[in-house]
Amino acid sequence: MEVNLMEKTIYIRMRNRVQVKPEESLLLKDIAQIIASEDIYEQLAALQVLKVTPKDHIHIVDVMKVIEFITGIYRDHEVQAVGPPQTIIEVIYKKKGMSIPFFILVWFLLFFGAALTIMNFHEDVSMQTVHERLYYIMTGKEVEKPLLFQIPYSIGIGVGMVLFFNHVFKKRLNEEPSPLEVEMFNYQQSLDQYVILHENKESVKHIDDD
């Protein structure tokens, strides 16, 4: 009896996010992981759940709608859902190539913006004075440009930024995520929650007072 019940159960786990092209048809296997008996698995995985229209940018597929869809076809099967309750369908349109002048403009803005930030910080904390004081303590001489400290310190800033962001151009130094990647992940999680709450009509229900 228990074996028969297991064979009549369909398990689905919704994916967090699926990226698709415009006007693409989404099958059940595209938006969810499926565990089912061999005699229905192929047919079940090939069920068309959604057709992306040219106007779509973000679409939310709710697990309740998926369960309703499956049970409407396999009435003698039980559907068990685990994992995320929704899947975010993100429509990816072809991106236009970035122009060289625009790339150079952005690069200059970022470069000089970062340089000004570092210089303003050093001016605020009187880094020049600190270096001069340290040089005087160690050598007993007063100089206006203590290069013995300034050159290694400047190199250390660059090396420190490389280690902090854990990247040299596109090459990762190790498998540990950088603080920037963690913040981007947290931002993406918050963005996904916002999209789910505002795009999924089943998430919020307004009940009239009358």
Image (cartoon, rainbow, N blue to C red):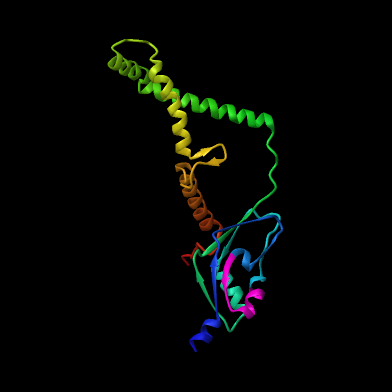
Please say whether residue 39 is one of the residues in the magenta stretch.
yes
Q: Taking 84 as reference, is 103 left or right?
A: right
Residue 126: x and y in percent read 35, 20
Considering only vertical position in the picture, is 42 above or below 157? below
Judged left or right of residue 2, residue 133 is left
Q: Quick one: which residue is furthest to the bottom in this view?
A: 1
- Residue 53 appearing in the image: yes
Q: Residue at x 45, y 37 (%)?
A: 163
Residue 101 vertical placement versus 186 (above, below): above
User: How many numbered marks appear?
Assistant: 0
**Residue 27: percent from left, percent from top:** 66, 66
Q: Residue at x 71, y 58 (%)?
A: 23
Residue 105: image quadrant is top right
Q: Residue at x 57, y 40 (%)?
A: 170
Q: Is residue 183 magenta?
A: no
Give the quadrant of residue 103.
top right
- Magenta highlight range: 32-44
Residue 20 horizontal/vertical position (percent): 66, 56
Quick one: 6 or 174, which is closer to the camera?
174
Residue extending farthest front: 139
Q: Nearer the viewer, residue 150 or 187?
A: 150
- Confirm whether residue 120 shows in the render: no
Q: Residue at x 50, y 41 (%)?
A: 173
In the picture shown, does residue 45 fall above or below 147? Answer: below
